[in-house]
Structure formats: structure tokens, C-alpha cells
Amino acid sequence: MPCQRIWRKNWVLFKIKPFGILPLELIKISADETTLIADLANRIWHAYYSAFIDLHQIDYMLDKFYSKESLHKQIEDGQEFYKISEDDVVKGFISISCKSPEDYFIHKFYILSSEHGKSKGTEVMTMIKKLINQRNNGADTNVRLTVNRQNYKAINFYFKNHFTIETVEDFDIGNGYFMTDFVMLLKLRNS
């Protein structure tokens, strides 16, 4: 059975309104809106990742993975990008893909540093899990992602959200740079 995709432009997947706060929304981004993703990535990466990744590598990775051409190719290859919005203000973005009906991959999960510690990441993770469960009609599913091994804050966030470390990988991304990551796994079981 092939992966089910939703291709509606600007379709709001979920709204969560906890404790009377304005709702977070995941809104699908079209290929025409990739500049928004590139701008957010630039802001988030420079503010957050410079603590444990060399600035030259950050710039290299932004150019490699967030150029207009690269983002269009990622969308063409099946990644779905969503902006994380609250009261019409964009707070971050995610991208996911379906590798097979039983396997999903979270490629990108970024929220502005100013929004950390406000439970927004957990709310977004809940939305991602609901989205995947809807697409798979509640079937058992594995969800994977990669995270830098020095990104302790993110690693602990994923542990809190029931991910485990599956493997340790060093990905050669060219120009003498490597992504030194954990591959983390979440088993969504609905039995």
C-alpha cells in the first residue's frame, strides 16, 4: 500500500489550544514558499547551533540544504514542509516524509530559540504523531530522525517524547564536513 499524501496548499493540519492559549498550527508549505523556510533556517541555525557547530560548517550546510534548488528537490523527492504558526506568527518548521507505510522520517524539526521551554515542541510532536496515525489508519509505524550528538537539549527532548537511540552515524556532507548524529527511533504502536 503506497504512502498517503496530502497535497492541499496551505491546509491547516491541526490546531491545538491548550489552557486557553492561542492554538499552534501546522500549515503545509508549497514549493513557492521555500524562501520562508530558508530564512527561518538561517535565523534558527545561527542562533542555536553555533554553540556546537563551527560557523563555516553552519553556512555550508545552510547553502547545501536550504538553497531554493535544494528545497525544491527535497519537496520533489517527497518531503512535506509545514510551518509552525501561532496567531499567524511563524515560530518554526518541520519536514517529514513517508519512506513506506510503516516508516516515516522527520527530516527537520526547528523552532525559534525564543520559543524553547514553552511546550511548543511537545505540542508539535503530538501533531506529527496524530498526522502519521491518521495516514496509517492507526497501524504500527516507525518514525526516525537524526540529531547532532552534541545537541543535548534536543536529544533529551526526543527522549521525553519516547524516542530511543537506534544507531550512531557520521554522515559525510562534503567539503570536509560531517554530521555526527544519532539516528533516533519512535515506535508508534496502536495495539
Image (cartoon, rainbow, N blue to C red):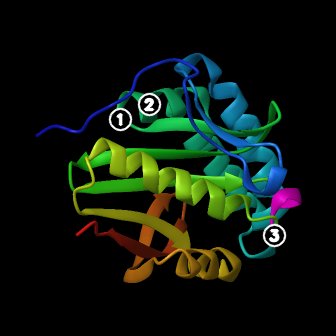
Q: Earlier in the sequence, mark 3 or mark 1?
A: 1
Q: Is 47 left, or right, of 30 in this rendering?
A: right
The residue at the far left in this view is: 1
Q: Nearer the viewer, mark 2 or mark 3?
A: 3
Q: Which residues are magenta?
A: 113-117
Q: Picture coordinates of residue 112 (x, y %)?
A: 80, 53
Give amino acid for label 2.
Ile
Location of mark 2 (residue): 75
Query: With respect to residue 142, does 169 lie above or below?
Result: below
Give amino acid for label 1.
Gly
Main SS of residues in magenta: helix
The residue at the far front in this view is: 20
Location of mark 1 (residue): 78
Residue displayed at 33% across by 31% down: 5
Contact flag, marks 2 and 1 (Cβ < 8 Å)? yes
Q: Nearer the viewer, residue 25 or 99?
A: 25
Residue displayed at 54% across by 21% down: 30
Q: Is 19 left, or right, of 75 in this rendering?
A: right
Location of mark 3 (residue): 117
Give amino acid for label 3.
Gly
Q: Regarding mark 1 in the picture, which secondary structure is present there?
A: loop
Residue displayed at 26% across by 47% down: 136
Indicate whether residue 116 is drawn in magenta: yes
Q: Which mark is residue 130?
A: none
The residue at the far right in this view is: 114
Toward which corner of the image does residue 19 lie, by quadrant? bottom right
Toward which corner of the image does residue 139 lie, by quadrant? bottom left
Q: Earlier in the sequence, mark 2 or mark 3?
A: 2
